[in-house]
Image: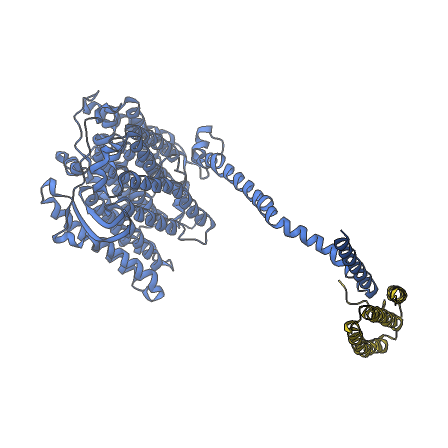
Amino acid sequence: MSVTPYIVLSSILFTIGCVGVLTRRNAIVVFMCVELMLNASNLALVAFARQHGNLDGQIAAFFVMVVAAAEVVVGLAIIMTIFRTRRSASVDDASLLKY
Amino acid sequence: MHALHEVVHAPVVDPSSASGVFTLLWLVIALPLAGAAVLLLGGRFTDRWGHLLGTALPIGSFVLSLWMFIDVLGRDSADRQVSQHLYTWIQVGHLDVGMDLLYDPLSSLFLLLITGVGSLIHVYSIGYMEHDPRRRRFFGYLNLFVAAMLLLVLSENYLGLFLGWEGVGLASYLLIGFWQYKPSAAAAAKKAFVINRVGDIGMSLAIMLFFVTFGSTSFTVISASADRASTGTLTALGLLLLLGACGKSAQVPLQAWLLDAMEGPTPVSALIHAATMVTAGVYLVVRSSFVFDLAPNAQTAVVVVAVVTLLWGAIIGCAKDDIKKVLAGSTMSQIGYMMLGAGLGPAGYAFAIFHLLVHGFFKANMFLGAGSVMHGMDDDVDMRHYGALRKAMPVTFLTFSMGYLAIIGFPGFSGFWSKDKIIETALADNWLVGLCAIVGAGVTGFYMTRLMLLTFFTDKRWEKGVHPHESPKIMTIPLIVLAALSALGGVMLIGNWIVDYLAPVVGTPPHENAPLPAIVVTLIAVLVVAAGVTLAWFLVGKRDVPRTAPQQVSPVVLAARNDLYGDAINDTLVVNPGRRVVGGLLTFDRYGVDGTLTGGPVAIGAVAGQLRRVQNGFVRSYALSLLGGVLLVVLALLAVNLA
């Protein structure tokens, strides 16, 4: 079975996520794009695991999911707090921590 | 010129170790030193009796010195050198310097002069400084000076001598600037100290050269092996010692500090800047006779310095209106005479010391007399405000007259004998030097007569509200004693006593064929002095003296009033170039050295200042740089794997 379509799909998803992170201002959207990138890499991991016939990649994908879930909890909480104090979810507005 | 010295070899210093009264030799120094310690450390607790203690201790030293002197007079002339080893001072490798004291005819005379005249001046100061709130401190400094001066003349090696040498320099500094709230006094003290440092460079280099050449600074060792050193080394030693002597004794070219030193209290001028400390240079040259006798070129340098100074000081003395500055110029000039004697070798050493002693008497007398006059005139020093004081201050006038007759060389008075001997010896050595010495004597007659006339004769030119009065007994008694010594100091020459007495230290004078009989030289000198006195009578005594100095004067008078431009010469030749060099070094240090060291960090700081602008706070730009970094890593990995 060829894994090429899966890798291509994974690359497309990753690129979409990446461009989304770089171009969108809304923190929620940026966050979703990050998730998209994580899942793109998960897809690649699972595809390569399938190709090599072992479970290493699949286990790594599980780890990524767990970490992503934890990250979502923390990240969404931060975004909520920022929104509450600043009445804005734009990532460009939160730019106080600088030189 | 110096052919006559070639056969002469300086006697070797060969002391026996101390016994009898000489075991107390250390006490001569220790007494005034203890006085200084008690008075300076004791603080206000000693205010009430400090001056009495400070006077008693030098008198104690004087009694000891007199006792030793009498003891030594009873001995055979070969047995008059005594040394006392106190302790080992420095012992490092081959360097072994002991704290040794040497009592010989030369130091015995200095001991009597320092403690004797010093005690009289201490007594005088009790009266003179009576109303000064810091009198106790003054006596502490005076005692410190006496102790240092005694160490200077008693030390058996050059290093100990140097310790005393620096000690008297310190005491001189403290006492010139005693009234330190006067900016002029503070500046004068600093000037004296700095100019003395220049001379001290010569001294310290000479001591190092002694160590290198002889492995020791002991007079005993060096005098025994001096002829083994090369003439070049000995000449260098002689010139370095001369530089030191010039600084301490205010000889040209290091003479500029002495006139300013008159800012100190008058007893200080009498003790330090007339009778004792400034003659230390003469002592140094005479003490180093074993070096100078073998270095004719250095001796010639001494003679040249001496002749220039004796005329220089005399000319300055002619134009000053400040009574103390006239006396200071005169001191400079008289030390020139002593240096001249010392530069003439064994023929002149004894006469140099003779003149030094009688000068100590009559100059201390005149300085204290000037102090007495100032005491009566509300501390005014301008002679143009004096006049006709002989009736108001009869004792001061009479004692001052003794000093005056002694310094101009009036026949029979002490200065007559000593100066005459130096002039005779100088004439026998070189007619030009002798001529300068005679001219100097004439100028001395002029300026001293001018001083006498302006102060004690002519009309009253007193300031309003000044009521001159005689000083109290405690001040006049030292004056009377010193006046007697000034008049009778010549007894030391009876039967050539002083020459024979000093012979074990400085050698016997060779017999020379004088170009003129001694009586003719004496007659010429007396006539020249008489001419100077007469000139002063016509120029000062017979005219009205203006109360302010005339401004329309000849360039010569103007130059003399400005100390013959000694300060201007120093400024042009040394101070200003030195200042420019220091300024250049400062600029180089600031921009060259500091620029190199701090330039790198400054550049890095500037770059960092720009680089930190990358941290702009926008998350998405961080994400972009992250992406760029990842891409770089990936490309690098690909490049490595595919290559």
Q: Foreground residue, B192 or B312?
A: B192
> Which quadrant of the figure has residue B501?
top left
* Up/down of B117 relative to B540, above or below: below
Q: Foreground residue, B285 or A96?
A: A96
* Up/down of B123 relative to A7, above or below: above
The residue that appears at 77% across and 61% down in the rendered structure is B615
Compared across the picture, whether A57 is left or right of A33 comes to left
Q: Is residue B392 visible?
A: no
The residue that appears at 18% across and 48% down in the rendered structure is B83
Measured as percent of width and height from the top left, residue B290 is found at: 23, 35
Measured as percent of width and height from the top left, residue B387 is found at: 37, 41
Q: Foreground residue, B642 or A28?
A: B642
- How many numbered circles are shown? 0
Compared across the picture, whether B143 is left or right of B70 comes to right
The residue that appears at 83% across and 77% down in the rendered structure is A76
Measured as percent of width and height from the top left, residue B463 is found at: 43, 46
Measured as percent of width and height from the top left, residue A88 is found at: 88, 73
Letter of the chain in yellow: A
* Up/down of B630 relative to B217, above or below: below
Structure colour scheme: by chain
Q: Residue furthest top?
A: B515
Chain B pictured colour: blue
The N terminus of chain B lies in quadrant: top left
Q: Is residue B155 visible?
A: yes
Compared across the picture, whether B547 is left or right of B298 comes to right
> Which quadrant of the figure has residue B409?
top left
> Which quadrant of the figure has residue B358?
top left
